[in-house]
Amino acid sequence: MNIYLIAVVIYLVFMAMVGLYFAKKSVKNSDDFMVAGRSLPLFIVMGTLLATFVGSGTVVGGASFIYQYGPFAAIFNLSGGIVGAVILYFIAGKIRKVEIYTVPELLARRFGNGALYISSVIIIFAFVGIAAYQFTGGAYVLQLTTGIPLEIGAIIMCALVIFLTVSGGLFSVAYTDALSAILIILGFIIGVPFALNAVNGFDGLALSLPETAKSWNGGLSFPQLLGYFLPLFLLVLGDQNMYQRFSSAKDPSVARRSTIGFLVGSIFVISLTILLATTSIVLFPEIKPDTAILSLAIEGVPLVVGLLILCAAVAFIITTATSYLLSASGNIVRDLIESSSKNKISESKLLWYNRVTVFVLGILAYVLGQFFPSVLAIQMYSYTMYGASLTPAILATVLWKRATKAGVVSSMIVGGSATMIWEIGLDRPLDWNSVLFALPLSVLTLIIISLVTQNKDLSTDSKNHFAG
């Protein structure tokens, strides 16, 4: 039997057992399910932040970008998450103090239910898309190790992710995240020397790379490069998953300090990913770009090292998918169902609602994943849908006193609509990512309408718990 398949299956079974353990021992109510009882220690928060960031988007989507455009363009592209992590340091403590479950709840405390409902719908659309490309990334692993068709592999990954999320909630997600973070760093550190040796070191790599891959921009125009940088930057800066991790920390100090570990880990993993995927350009010139790291793990390094990288990649893909399904279920249950209910819903029923919602969203994510040609394509769509629509509103809520309800709500609607128009209605003119169209419109709408409606929105000053 295929040794790679055996290793991956063993690790997946282990993760499933962790989920069952926390389902029985720790998850007693919706608070445990959504924010791990607000009890996570520093190391676990650091690990779960890193694993949420480094999923299929880095191991598959990021590697695909590196393979197509080279290492120097990739530095610009992938540094978006690092820049976002720096800014998160200054707001993480504030987020923990207000003890939110979801980003729409944060917006609603200042701008009311209109902001809550609109932001919830946007997050659900974006997060289902992000979960979808995790299924595709996992399916690539199964195809490379077993020959299973991508469609079947995606179904298998979908089923496992749903099971893990439904069983243990954020407790199982956070602890498996921390383990996955250790595994990916260890696997990549060990793998880099072997990969470089296979291409005769840095000198051999530099000589063998195509000329386009050696250029600073990989053949992309500056607007195209910016179109890849901004979505990741905006997602990390406003990601509901990050905010929920801060809320799950045992105190504001742990939330703030966790961003330092996240920043260091991100720099480390991104640097190693660039090195590994760049060697794949030379070693495997004819593979699908999405499989750059995975092909290297199977054919470009010693067996033991490859197994470690492969298991780590699968672990990150799965834990990222569970994070986004869990987070989106919270938007439906807390922001849409519970907030609109006239009667108080029992904890047992809320927990049941969360689990059913995870199942439904998982199926929707699988269906959505069948309509995009690559992980990188759906990654850019999902990141922009979230970043252009919500990140300006989130930052205004926390940092800008003069933001108004009309400005924030209009900004979200314009950002989401512009993303859909550019991606679907106009089919990405000039081959530019939609963030270059949607983000400026969203920000300008927020600023202009907020300034125009200053005197009309008296509730802004009275409800300003965050800004300043």
Image (cartoon, rainbow, N blue to C red):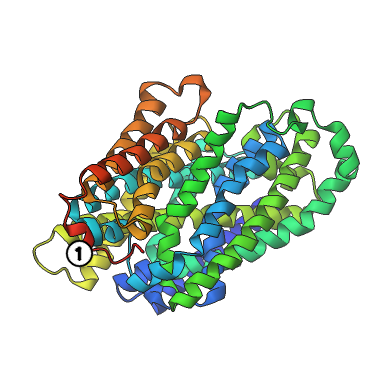
Residue 24 vertical placement versus 214 (above, below)? below
x%, y% of residue 440? 41, 35
Please tell me whether mark 1 sits on a helix, a strand or a loop.
helix
Q: Is residue 247 visible?
A: no
Question: How many numbered tags mark residues here?
Answer: 1
- Which residue is found at the position 38% from the left and 38% from the top? 367
Furthest toward the left, the residue is: 342
Q: Amino acid at mark 1?
A: Ser
- Which residue is found at the position 57% from the left and 74% from the top? 43
x%, y% of residue 172? 46, 68
- Which residue is found at the position 64% from the left and 62% from the top? 264
x%, y% of residue 420? 35, 31
Q: Is residue 169 visible?
A: yes
Residue 11 vertical placement versus 234 (above, below)? below
x%, y% of residue 444? 35, 38
Asked whether, in this view, residue 306 is left or right of residue 350, the answer is right
User: Which quadrant of the view contains residue 78?
Assistant: top right
Mark 1 crowd level (few <14, some 14–19, many ≥20, 10 Å Cα): few
Residue 283 vertical placement versus 83 (above, below)? above
Asked whether, in this view, residue 150 is left or right of residue 463, the answer is right
Q: Nearer the viewer, residue 286 or 420?
A: 420
Asked whether, in this view, residue 390 is left or right of residue 59, the answer is left
Q: Quadrant of the C terminus?
A: bottom left
User: Which quadrant of the view contains residue 463?
Assistant: bottom left
Residue marked by disc 1: 462
Q: Nearer the viewer, residue 129 or 21?
A: 129
